[in-house]
Image: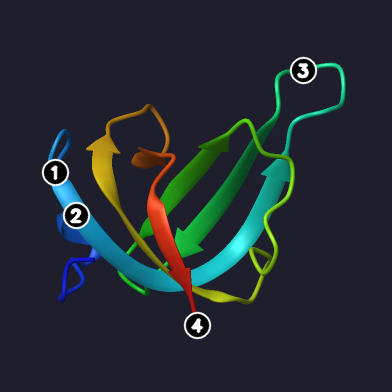
Amino acid sequence: MIDHATPISDLQPRAMAAISGRIVSIQVEPRDAAPKLTARVDDGTGRVEAVFMGRRAIAGVEPGARIRLEGRICASDALPRLYNPRFELG
């Protein structure tokens, strides 16, 4: 993974970035929809959504956990997103 974390407030769409923060909320798609888990992460400068397609649960990915993410930033109407990022807990 990338050695240094980029503040969420400095993220640029389509750029690769590493982010470190705390998970503040989790959203899981209902059973009748395609599996998707979204973790909202805050680093004190802003928030980003990490979207894990094809998953309804990931061990350790829960509110309050520290997480480090790496991936390509996608612009969205609400918050920047990373789809299926690499991640480390702790």
Q: Residue reaching furthest right? A: 31
Residue picked out by circle 4: 90
Which SS class for mark 3?
loop
The amino acid at mark 2 is Ala
* Picture residue at 23% right of the left edge, 66% below the top: 1
Q: Nearer the viewer, residue 74 or 84?
A: 84
- The answer to whether 59 is drawn above or below residue 15 in the figure is below
The alpha-carbon separation of the residues under discs 1 and 4 comes to 25 Å
Q: Earlier in the sequence, mark 3 or mark 4?
A: 3
Q: Earlier in the sequence, mark 2 or mark 4?
A: 2
Q: Earlier in the sequence, mark 2 or mark 1?
A: 1
The alpha-carbon separation of the residues under discs 3 and 2 comes to 29 Å
Q: Earlier in the sequence, mark 1 or mark 3?
A: 1
Dot 2: few (<14), some (14–19), or many (≥20) neighbours within 10 Å? many
* Picture residue at 30% right of the left edge, 64% below the top: 19
Does the CB distance between marks 2 and 1 fall below 8 Å? yes
- The answer to whether 65 is drawn above or below residue 76 in the figure is below
The amino acid at mark 4 is Gly
Residue picked out by circle 3: 33
Q: In the picture provided, is 39 more to the left or to the right than 8?
A: right
Q: Disc number at residue 12?
A: 1
Dot 1: few (<14), some (14–19), or many (≥20) neighbours within 10 Å? some
